[in-house]
Image (cartoon, helix red, strand yellow):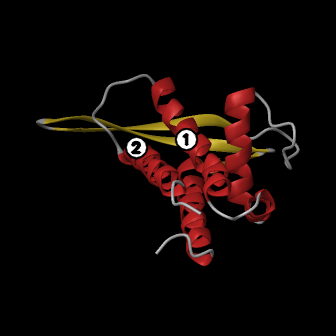
């Protein structure tokens, strides 16, 4: 057993931090598609942490599948990951493929300060929209809890 999975866990946290900056507000001036790419990159890296765990520990694929299938947020993460890589998740447990359906943009303009843009991305699951950052936050929390439970994280 080695701890190479911790590299991926740290990568997930860095993608989360980028996502958080977009959610809270950034002074960067990029297209909304660039920001959307960060959101998808978070979910891809987050879901694939499971592969890193399988390939560097004694945990089996079934252990990861049980974990993912036990949490709605992780199931959304998985479907967003596969959907962004392959267009659809053929094994999704949802009626319709979850997708980033829309984004809300907030501008903060104040005196001598540069304009800040905050973006809230929404994931459509079936016919309901969920805040993508809240899903990401819960996914990160769930992975950390899982790693601690399996004694893979101090």
What number is the disc on residue 13?
A: none
Precedes in sequence: disc 1 or disc 2: 2
Frontmost of labels 1 and 2 is 2
In the image, residue 143 lies at what x, y percent? Answer: 59, 63
Q: Nearer the viewer, residue 97 or 53?
A: 53
> SS for tag 1?
strand
Task: Give the CA separation, mark 1 to mark 2.
Answer: 13 Å
Please tell me how many numbered marks the rendered image carries.
2
In the image, residue 104 lies at what x, y percent? Answer: 51, 38
Q: Which residue is mark 2?
A: 18
Question: Are there few (<14), some (14-19), or many (20+) residues within 10 Å of tag 2?
Answer: some
In the image, residue 72 lies at what x, y percent? Answer: 74, 59
Q: Which corner quadrant of the image does residue 54 belong to? A: bottom right
> SS for tag 2?
helix
Q: Is residue 126 left or right of residue 153?
A: right
Q: Residue drawn at (67%, 39%), measured in percent from left and top? A: 81
Q: Residue drawn at (67%, 31%), measured in percent from left and top? A: 84
Q: Is residue 22 left or right of residue 108?
A: right
Q: Residue drawn at (60%, 44%), measured in percent from left and top? A: 43
Q: Nearer the viewer, residue 98 or 47?
A: 47
Q: Residue drawn at (32%, 38%), measured in percent from left and top? A: 26
Which residue sits furthest left?
A: 112
Q: Is residue 65 left or right of residue 54?
A: right
Which residue sits furthest front?
A: 1
What number is the disc on residue 121?
A: 1
Is the N terminus in the top left, top right, bottom left or bottom right quadrant?
Answer: bottom right
Question: Are there few (<14), some (14-19), or many (20+) residues within 10 Å of tag 1?
Answer: many
In the image, residue 154 lies at what x, y percent? Answer: 46, 75
């Amino acid at each position: 057993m080695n701890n190479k999975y911790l590299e991926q866990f740290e990568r997930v946290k860095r993608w989360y931090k980028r996502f958080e900056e977009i959610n809270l507000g950034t002074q960067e001036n990029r297209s909304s598609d660039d920001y959307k790419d960060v959101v998808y990159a978070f979910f891809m890296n987050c879901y694939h942490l499971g592969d890193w765990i399988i390939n560097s520990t004694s945990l089996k694929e079934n252990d990861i599948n049980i974990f993912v299938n036990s949490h709605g947020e992780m199931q959304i993460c998985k479907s967003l990951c596969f959907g962004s890589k392959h267009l659809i998740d053929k094994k999704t447990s949802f009626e319709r493929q979850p997708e980033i359906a829309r984004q809300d943009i907030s501008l903060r303009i104040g005196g001598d300060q540069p304009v800040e843009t905050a973006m809230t991305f929404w994931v459509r699951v079936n016919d309901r929209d969920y805040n993508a950052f809240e899903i990401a936050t819960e996914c990160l929390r769930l992975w950390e809890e899982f790693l601690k439970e399996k004694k893979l994280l101090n």
